[in-house]
Image: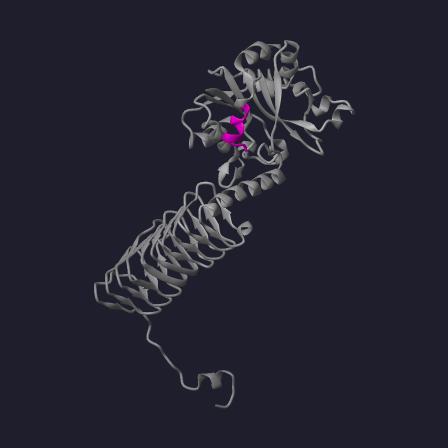
Amino acid sequence: MTSVIIMAAGAGTRMKSTTPKVLHKISGKEMLYYSINEAAKLSNDIEVVVYHQKDRVIQAMRKYFSDIRFITQEHSKFPGTGGAVKCCSPKHNKVFILNGDMPLVSADELRKFENIDADIVMSVIHLDDPDGYGRVVIQNNEVIKIIEQKDATEEEKQIKFVNAGVYLINKEILEKFLPLLDNNNASKEYYLTDIIDLAKKAGKTIKAIEVKEENFKGVNTKYDLANAERIHQNRIKQKLMRNGVIMHLPETIFIENDVKLIGECEIESGCVLKGNSIIDHSLIKANSIIEDAKITNSEIGPMARIRPDSEIIDSKIGNFVEIKKSALNNVKAGHLSYLGDSEIDSGTNIGAGTITCNYDGKNKYKTIIGKNVFIGSDSQLVAPLTIEDDTMIAAGSTITKNVKKGELAISRTPQKTIKNFFYKFFKKEG
């Protein structure tokens, strides 16, 4: 078993945001979530080093994880990556050091480090353009030293192998060499990478593992964030399609990390599936949005919006229909309706333009509609309201009172006609 240290203390100034870098989201989850989630597949001892807006970072991660330790970096005394690790107390003899801004790294990739026999295993990437990265000097398959770009000579800057920032280190090396780090460098920071030089001089074995840039991609700017999300989205959709989901123009579809699709679902172009939505044997037509809802054996859209806490079973929901916090079972709502805080039972048809008036400016109320109900077009159902089975609501009605079984409810002003008004108004002959 290994311990894991995840560094999440930085301000992330290049993100140009008031949000801590590690809390920017990819596919609906904070970047730091992914680092911790993969680490949890490898270890029961995880420490996350925080500093910048630490309370905000801790609070965000506590929503998902209860068994990790948060360590505050003594930034005024020990800035830098080496200073971050100085604060930690790993329990196991092998220690992974990860970054909180690497949302694409996986536990399977990290397990490859454990197959290499060395005191230190570090990740390297071969880049044609290594500008901005620390360079790694490798001879005879062993790492000689790491040079931060700020401290590199022009000759050293030509090296193509760069530090990917992930390490597997024997605990005793950290205990021995962390106290020896100094900040005699251009940034006046304590570099974790200086341990490589110290360990090398002490005769320790240091080996590099070449990794794919895509998997160990760090996020430093919002452009990086967008690229990382694109890669992550491709992974989500590829997995779903391999499991039998049909997608039309998948590059136009957005699916968050926790969405579940069951069976041979079909997702048309431009759809957005968010939160903890479950789509079960259903068709989601073009440009529809599903948020934290459950859809079973149903057809949604095109251009429909199903909002949180909705459950739709055996139903057809058409274009420009919005549903919020409602349960529909075997219902048809073809177009242009809003159904909020409602329960609608089987065999019921919702006419175009129907809305449940669920909010009075202070409180929200429920509309309950029974079986085999026909709601005429352009009806307003003013909650709280119960419409019983086998009833009809006439088109254009505003319903404010409960409707009993078998009844027709109609609420309209009498129609008036004025003979020849058109000709009088426009002063034309009739």
Residue beneath the point at 28% across and 64% down: 373
Q: Is residue 357 depicted above or below 95 in this figure?
A: below
| Magenta highlight range | 105-113
Query: Among all residues in the image, which is located at the extreme bottom?
Result: 429
> Percent x, y for residue 169?
56, 18
Camera sees residue 311: yes
Query: Among all residues in the image, which is located at the extreme right?
Result: 154
Q: Is residue 335 depicted above or below 113 in this figure?
A: below
> Percent x, y for residue 89?
49, 15
Does 281 sit left or right of 94 as displayed?
left
> Percent x, y for residue 345?
28, 57
Q: Is residue 364 depicted above or below 69 in this figure?
A: below
Camera sees residue 50: no
Q: Most prominent secondary structure in the magenta stretch?
A: helix
Does 134 sit left or right of 382 as displayed?
right
Residue beneath the point at 50% across and 20% down: 71
Along the line of sight, the residue nearer the viewer: 14 or 223:
223
